[in-house]
Amino acid sequence: MLATITSGAVLGVDAYPVRVEVDLARGLPSMAIVGLPQGAVREARERVGAALANGGFKVPPRRVTINLAPADIPKSGSAFDLPIALALLAAGGTFWESDLSGTCCVGELGLDGAIRPVHGVLAVALMCRREGMNTLVVPAANAAEAAVVAGLDVRPAARLGDVVRFLSGGGPLPPATAERFEQGTSGGVPDFADVRGQETARRALEIAAAGSHNLLMLGPPGAGKSMMARRLPSILPPMTLTEAVEVTNVHSVAGRLRGGIGLLRERPFRAPHHSVSDPGLVGGGGMPRPGEASLAHHGVLFLDELPEFRRSALESLRQPLEEGMIHIGRARTAVRLPARFMLVAAMNPCPCGHMGDGTERCICPAERVRRYRGRISGPLLDRIDMHVEVPRLAPDQLVGRGPAEGSTAIRARVREARERQLRRYDGTGVFANVQLDPRGTRRHCRLDDAGMALLEAAVHQLRLSARSYHRILRLTRTIADLDGTEAIDPIHVAEAVQYRSLDRPIAEPAPVL
């Protein structure tokens, strides 16, 4: 007796169909799972057996063989519990196998027959639509994310018995309804009105948000670098539906999606500790899973105390900063993880942190400062569009009572600049100035003679690379967009060049005590 039901497995952030085949043969009672099952899949024998027994279902005492096809790809996780149980019951004659036609099932089983949530349900739902499947049976806690996919009949279930009665025609299993998508308002994010002074850094963050540029803030402790970075999401434009689906899918696969949530509406803000491992930052593992860089997709990746991160972890960010994608190769497979994020980093100007703060407390010689800053490689700095100095606040700025501009006004300017970019690049697949390739940069970032002369002088004086040159051009385009003009003026070039402070040599050595 043979029965087959379709399930889904996640590889990277995408899902592929898995055929769960169950054969009941004569022989001593046993159960074997084949198809490269890993730990949690092998343990499904005990969970499924107990769930069936406690649910009042009987499986003939036969030699049971369970095959997960394709058999040459490793299978992990507990999502195969439900399809294995249903295929066992179908093979035993509880209901007809034809009742499973066009149906995909995922879910973990408790020993009492309860269906528990699993990771990556949204990826499986997208796979079902891609493969032309009609119905997806999911745990009730995963119903909201699965219902996001239009044109798919999503049936949430709380217990194994509910699914069996539904498939055998003995009881209803009400379909899930999709929530209406509404763009987030960043209402829970701290506001820029809390920031005193630091006009240059505030302006730099506004430019970065308008063009999705990468930013590094350099300043002494307590200057407000982390405070401003954590307020960046409050001025970013809201996510579109497509972006929200992509972000939710990544968080679902990573197991970071709380139960009952359909779509994430706020842009992610990820701030890993500097002790994070390489796979923790960019993803990986035996069965590759998303890291912090992918969890920040369409949002912000904030790296505080940048020089304290592992050199190998920082260097692994070079590819996603260029391509918006992470490629991970393994002996059996290769995956691609989305990672189109804004990199915002902060660091002290020297090891002690007091260089240039006006207090004369710095004891770092110039060579030590160079070694400290040398922890960040030139190729990585090349991929950061803006290097901004954040000075120590003066006492009058710190205690000033004048109102500071809030996030609402800044966000309005950023949205207007982004809308100009969307109109300009309509149909090209480019959504922000930072995504322009060299050809697009030459076309859309044209300078007049005065602006070109100014940029050429900066290239010679700062010895900028070709990559830095093109990033400055794209930065000038964003500054002009914020000013509401298509023409790029020399003043825009001058402002863009000033945001390259780390390209300048250390002029004077700090005093040595």
Image (cartoon, helix red, strand yellow):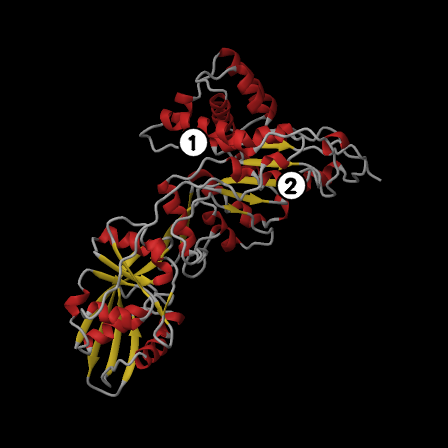
N-term-proximal mark, 2 vs 1? 2
Q: Quadrant of residue 33?
A: bottom left
Quarter holding the C terminus? top right
* Location of residue 406 in the rendering, given as x and y in whole percent from the top left corner: 58, 32
- The amino acid type of the residue labelled 2 equals Met
Which secondary structure, mark 1?
Answer: loop
Quarter holding the N terminus? bottom left
Q: Quadrant of residue 7?
A: bottom left
Q: Nearer the viewer, mark 2 or mark 1?
A: 1
On the question of residue 374 being in view, the answer is: no
**In the image: residue 388, left or right of residue 466:** right
Find residue 347 and name its label. 2
67 or 410: nearer the viewer: 410
Find residue 40 and name its label. none
272 or 457: nearer the viewer: 272
| Numbered circles on residues, count | 2
Task: Give the residue at the far top of this rendering.
Answer: 449
Which secondary structure, mark 2?
Answer: strand
- The amino acid type of the residue labelled 1 equals Ala
Task: Give the residue at the far bottom of this rendering.
Answer: 28
* Location of residue 304 in the rendering, given as x and y in whole percent from the top left corner: 61, 45
